[in-house]
Image (cartoon, rainbow, N blue to C red):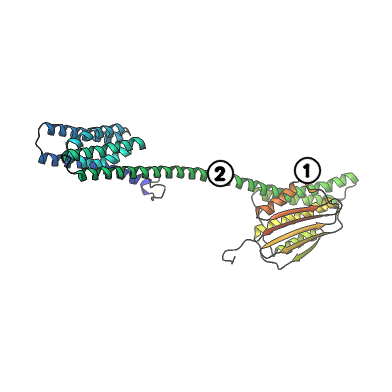
């Protein structure tokens, strides 16, 4: 079992409330120390008579209530009542004995800790007023500077702390909104990633397994129609199904990835030869990422298969064009053509959508131009990503 004490401290383990806890502790200790010091100073210069008895009673009651609030905070998680009672007892104490005015500082922050903003502002004003009245009585109204200085200083401090707390509350709400936005963004990214993976997997299935299986079925159906099967045709269909099984296993085990080769043009040229199409290259060939090459190869493969199945074309031409920072392919035939919109509406047009998704997922474009009786041109173009350290 791992010892929790041996774990290194991280940003998550350092709570943001720790400085506040230290501040609250210093306020509590400060009130206790100042209350004792003020009491000693008062009785050092004043006799223990009727007023002195009242001062001692108020000071003792205020200190006891404050101590009860501190104990309640650790035991009952409540300290509001104790702090309020301590303040209520301290207010007449500050009027009777201005020496206890020094306790106003910790009491000011203690009230801020347990009261809401409006109530805390009123409580702070009462503390300032009690100190000012006590000083006014002590000076017999002859030293207005002694009264007005703490009065306006206390009001300034009250409004400054109130503004600071409001700013912190606003920042807290902003942080909460940012966290919610971050969670929504993360959820959207996960959903987008899952959708992209489904599209990728569906495209791979369509471009490999589905196409090969369909080819095998066409071969077998043609033999059924002729009613005179030949061993060569059956063997060809068997080989196509065997390749389809291999590709299915690769997909299931996640092994279908862009496969690198000597060059993009050589791979496309091999595809063109397999489908009896002509291939040309325009521009100076540059190396492209495996992901880009894989997407372009799949587009060419799908377009060639579709042309062979449906176009009834006498010639098919594949052109690879390098534009500097982008590369494109177009597959043109002189076949019977079709209406692209009608194909997508009637059959779902998944092959066209899969090709478009491959190009657009890499930041490229995909177009289909076709008219019945006038052939078809399928074109895709994608940017070539900059490599690390390459000048942009």
Q: Which element type, helix, strand or loop, lies under badge 2?
A: helix
Which residue in the structure is indicated by mark 2?
187
Crowd tier of the residue under label 1, counting other residues whose Cα lies within 10 Å: few below 14, some 14–19, many 20 or above? few
Q: Residue at x 17, y 42 (%)?
A: 142
Q: Real-space Cα distance between discs 2 and 1?
A: 33 Å
Quarter location, residue 266: bottom right
How many discs appear? 2
Q: Is residue 32 above or below residue 240?
A: above
Rendered-image quadrant of the N terminus? top left
Residue receiving disc 1 = 347
Residue nearest the observer in this picture, 232 or 126: 126
Query: Does residue 125 appear in the picture of this structure?
Result: yes
Spot the residue most to the bottom. 284
Q: Which element is circle 1 on?
A: helix
Q: Position of residue 10 (x, y in %)?
A: 40, 50
Quarter in which the C terminus is drawn: bottom right
């Amino acid at each position: 079992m791992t010892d929790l004490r041996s774990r290194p401290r991280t940003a998550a383990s350092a709570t943001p409330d720790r400085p506040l806890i230290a501040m609250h502790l210093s306020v509590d200790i400060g009130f206790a120390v100042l209350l004792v010091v003020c009491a000693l100073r008062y009785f050092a210069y004043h006799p223990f008579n009727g007023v002195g008895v009242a001062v001692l009673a108020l000071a003792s009651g205020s200190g006891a209530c404050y101590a009860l609030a501190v104990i309640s905070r650790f035991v009952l998680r409540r300290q509001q009542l104790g702090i309020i009672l301590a303040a209520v007892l301290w207010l007449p104490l500050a009027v009777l004995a201005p020496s206890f005015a020094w306790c106003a500082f910790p009491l000011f922050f203690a009230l801020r800790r347990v009261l809401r903003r409006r109530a805390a502002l009123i409580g702070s004003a009462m503390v300032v007023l009690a100190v000012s009245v006590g000083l006014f009585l002590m000076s017999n109204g002859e030293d207005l500077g002694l009264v007005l200085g703490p009065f306006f200083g206390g009001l300034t401090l009250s409004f400054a702390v109130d503004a600071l707390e409001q700013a912190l509350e606003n920042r807290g709400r902003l942080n909460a909104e940012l966290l919610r936005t971050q969670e929504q963004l993360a959820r959207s990214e996960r959903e987008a990633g899952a959708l992209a993976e489904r599209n990728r997997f569906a495209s791979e299935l369509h471009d490999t397994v589905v196409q090969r299986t369909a080819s095998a079925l066409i071969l077998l159906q043609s033999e059924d129609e002729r009613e005179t099967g030949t061993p060569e045709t059956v063997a060809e269909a068997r080989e196509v199904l065997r390749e389809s099984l291999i590709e299915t296993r690769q997909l299931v085990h996640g092994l279908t990835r862009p496969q690198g080769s000597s060059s993009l043009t050589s791979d496309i040229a091999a595809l063109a030869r397999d489908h009896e199409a002509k291939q040309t290259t325009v521009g100076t060939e540059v190396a492209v990422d495996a992901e880009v090459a894989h997407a372009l190869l799949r587009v060419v493969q799908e377009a060639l298969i579709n042309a062979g199945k449906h176009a009834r074309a006498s010639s098919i031409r594949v052109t690879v064009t390098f534009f500097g920072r982008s590369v494109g392919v177009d597959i043109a035939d002189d076949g019977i053509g079709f209406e692209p919109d009608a194909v997508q509406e009637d059959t779902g047009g998944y092959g066209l959508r899969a090709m478009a998704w491959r190009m657009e997922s890499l930041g490229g474009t995909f177009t289909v131009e076709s008219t019945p009786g006038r052939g078809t041109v399928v074109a895709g173009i994608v940017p070539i990503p900059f490599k690390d350290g390459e000048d942009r």
